[in-house]
Image: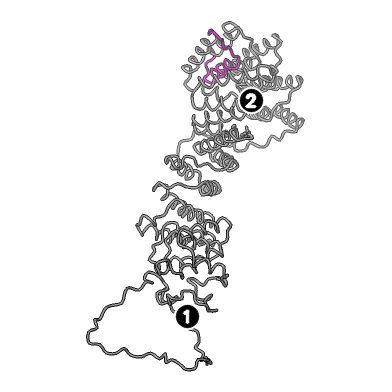
Amino acid sequence: MTSHLISRSLLKTLKPNAVAIRTISTTPFLLSQDPHLATDSTDHISTSLPPNPATGSPLYQENWRSPIPNSPSLTHSLVVPVGFAPPAARIRAISETLDMNSLLNMFADYTTSQRWSDMKQLFEFWVRCLDKSGKPNKPDVNLYNHYLRANLMMGAKAGDMLDLVAVMDDFSLAPNTASYNIVLKGMHRAKESEAAEKLLNRMLLSKKDESLPDDESYDLVIGLLFSNGENDRAMQLMDVALKSGYMLSTTVFSDCVRSCVAKGRTDTLVSIIERCKALDRNKSLCPSWILSTYMAEVATQADNSKLAFYAFEFMYKWINRGEMARPSVFLSVDEGLVVSALATAARTCNPTLVDGSWMILKRCLRGKKAANPASYIAKINAYASLGNLQKAFIALHEFENAYADAGKEVVDEMLSPFTSLYPLVLACSKKGFESLDEVYFQLETLSQGDTPYKSVAALNCIILGCANTWDLDRAYQTFAAISDSFGLTPNIDSYNALIYAFGKVKKTQEATKVYTHLVGEGVKPDARTYSLLVDAHLINRDPKSALTVIDDMINAGFEPSKETLKKLRRRCLRELDDEKDAQVESLAKKFQIRMGSENRRNMLFNMDYSRGRA
């Protein structure tokens, strides 16, 4: 149909309005030039005409003797009259002298200089010229794709591009993958996602090797769907592309990561990354540094340890690329992000994330300084949550060596078994005396090695672990072994752990003796020491002695905590001691502590549990 319309247009061009012209002749006589019928012959033989030399050209009905007539209406009878300007005489002359190879070379020059209009005009005049054999020029698919690209770069609409592809049938050409990709680029520019999907399905249904979609085809359609916010359809198409073994571009992969992270679809993103890693062609895909950092932050917030590990893996690649570049670019991961990742690994019990996080942190520090104490503590707690006590104590040893030159009080505060190392205490006492004895014997063996390792903080964890299991004998023996077997000096945390062990089994007098002993040894008690003594008296239902300890605590320069005062008030209410309760209220007002009410606790306490079930 298209060729028929073009032929009719060209026929109109080649038949201008006839005008009668009268001429004057100077010849003395006129020769008759009227046509005459041939004389009849009885021996003539009827033969058929040779084949039309214009076969295979859309210009079949055009006068082949004058393929480019000098007519002003020619500019309106082009192959595709979309935005065509009157051609220059130079281009018209060039089109008559070029063969296909020469035209391809000239198109290469035009592409370099981006002379798209000249390329378009030259092609449209060239197809109207005759070759050396006197037949109309017939382009091949590669040459026609140059023409399609010129129209695309000149801003042709997607519908016009499809019409141009349909015209290829008139030249007996079949569009290939490159032809369809040029049309897909036009649809991508016009944001026509539905049409792009239909064209991609058309390419798949053709089942021709030369027109099947390639990597670029899927990239164009998937990128268009992501840009239009059609994430689900883009994910489905990406899944089809990965299953078929196609290679994704970095841009499309980054769009996918950005979309999944923004929507919180971390599990979907993990699945896509794993599929990309399963293909050799997609293993090198890596989002940008900023996007990788953002992905790690979202992964730690969602407690997705796999996604956090993949994010650190991408960041590690960028660090390597930066160091190999010239000049070098030294990238570093925020240490707070590493601490968050270690906490995520502890909550999800992922040892791979622990090792990967610590590896990238060491790479970023580049041996110039030690990691922050929070990083070491997070690593210790992560191994403790995993139940890997050996690696946990190795990390503790690294921590102590890294901050050996720091002040003793600072190190003791950072290595307190009541706060920072409490997850390690819980891990040591998880299996009761079995795990506690195992850890103790390992520490005893390490203390007798070639490079002895002796740690008060590690032994304090064992003491507090024994106290948690109400094993007073093991707690006391471990405390005594600090000086006897290991040759170390107990610190305030050692005494506090022993006071806690005595108080938990209601041995308040022994706990008080421990306090008297540490003061006699010149060890300065801290706020926790007094709080543990208060707890010991409260367990023994002695609010009066607890108030006395609080007075000593205030005299020593410490303030009682809100939790301690609430425990003391609760005990006074249970013992119906209004006088001591008033003293507690006055202390709370003195230190501006809002105690709040305990109505719900009192309701539970006053319930009559002796009644039978209704």
Measuring from the top left, give residue 44's x and y in whole percent: 24, 83
Of the residues tagged 2 and 1, which is closer to the observer? 1
Q: Which residue is mark 1?
A: 14
Vertical comparison of 243 with 171: above or below:
above
Magenta span includes 256: no
Q: Local crowd at mark 1 within 10 Å, few (<14), some, or many (≥20)?
A: many
Measuring from the top left, give residue 165's x and y in whole percent: 44, 65
Q: Earlier in the sequence, mark 2 or mark 1?
A: 1
The residue closer to the viewer here, 489 or 203, is: 203
Looking at the image, which residue sits at the far front?
Answer: 28
Magenta span? 448-472
* Type of amino acid at the residue the image marks with label 1: Leu
Q: Is residue 601 visible?
A: no
Measuring from the top left, give residue 343's x and y in whole percent: 56, 32
Q: Is residue 386 visible?
A: yes
Q: Which residue is mark 2?
A: 373
In which quadrant of the rendered view does residue 203 lie?
bottom left
The residue closer to the viewer here, 601 or 95, is: 95
* Type of amino acid at the residue the image marks with label 2: Pro
